[in-house]
Image: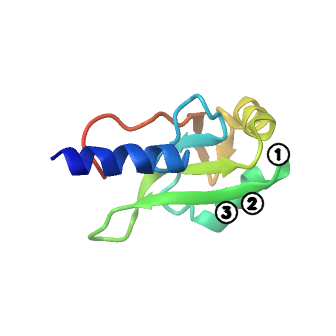
Amino acid sequence: MQGLAARIARRSRASPLAGGILSRGSCTKLFVGGLSYDTNEPVLKDAFNQFGDIVEVKVICDHVSGKSKGYGFVQFEREAAASTALKEMDGKSLDGRDIRVQYAQKRNGGLS
């Protein structure tokens, strides 16, 4: 068990992305909720692209059906871009739905 703990510790020091969702401390990754089930990654990227360079866009889908779960993540290169996007996009309409935008929170519990 000690070997596993050491590997996890090394992995988390190696990269700020190692734990999956970034903690609020990094401030570059946003959670986007309330998405239309028809919203895909290119549409989400296009909506947020105006605020700065994007590292990654991910719409979360059900692993069995492949359909959107109605939320996703947008990660920017710079904190300022993420901050502006949060202020400008929270509560705005995208694909006919009012979306919620907030900083992504670090996952609690278990390894993923």
Q: Are marks 3 and 2 in contact (CB under 8 Å)?
A: yes
Q: Mark 3 points at which residue?
A: 43
Name the mark on residue 19: none
Drawn side of residue 108 relative to residue 85, left or right: left
Tag 2: amino acid: Asp
Residue 11, position as x, y percentages in the image: 43, 51
Q: Distance between the residues labelled 1 and 3?
A: 15 Å
Callout 3: SS? helix
Marks 1 and 3: CB-CB under 8 Å? Answer: no
Is residue 19 visible in the rendered image? The answer is no
Foreground tag (1 vs 3): 1
On the image, numbered disc 2 is attached to which residue?
46
Locate residue 4, reporting x and y percent: 24, 50
Residue at the spot 63% in from the left edge and 54% down from the top edge: 95
Report whether 83 appears left or right of 33.
right
| Residue type indicated by callout 3 | Val
Residue 64 versus residue 35: which sits nearer the camera?
A: 64
Q: For this view, does 98 lie left or right of residue 4?
A: right
Q: Is residue 18 visible?
A: yes
Front: mark 2 or 1: 1
Answer with mark 2 or mark 1, whichever residue precedes in sequence: 2
Q: Which amino acid does label 1 sit on?
A: Phe
Disc 1: which residue: 51
Q: In this view, does 102 lie above or below 110?
A: above
Q: Helix, strand, or loop for circle 2?
A: helix
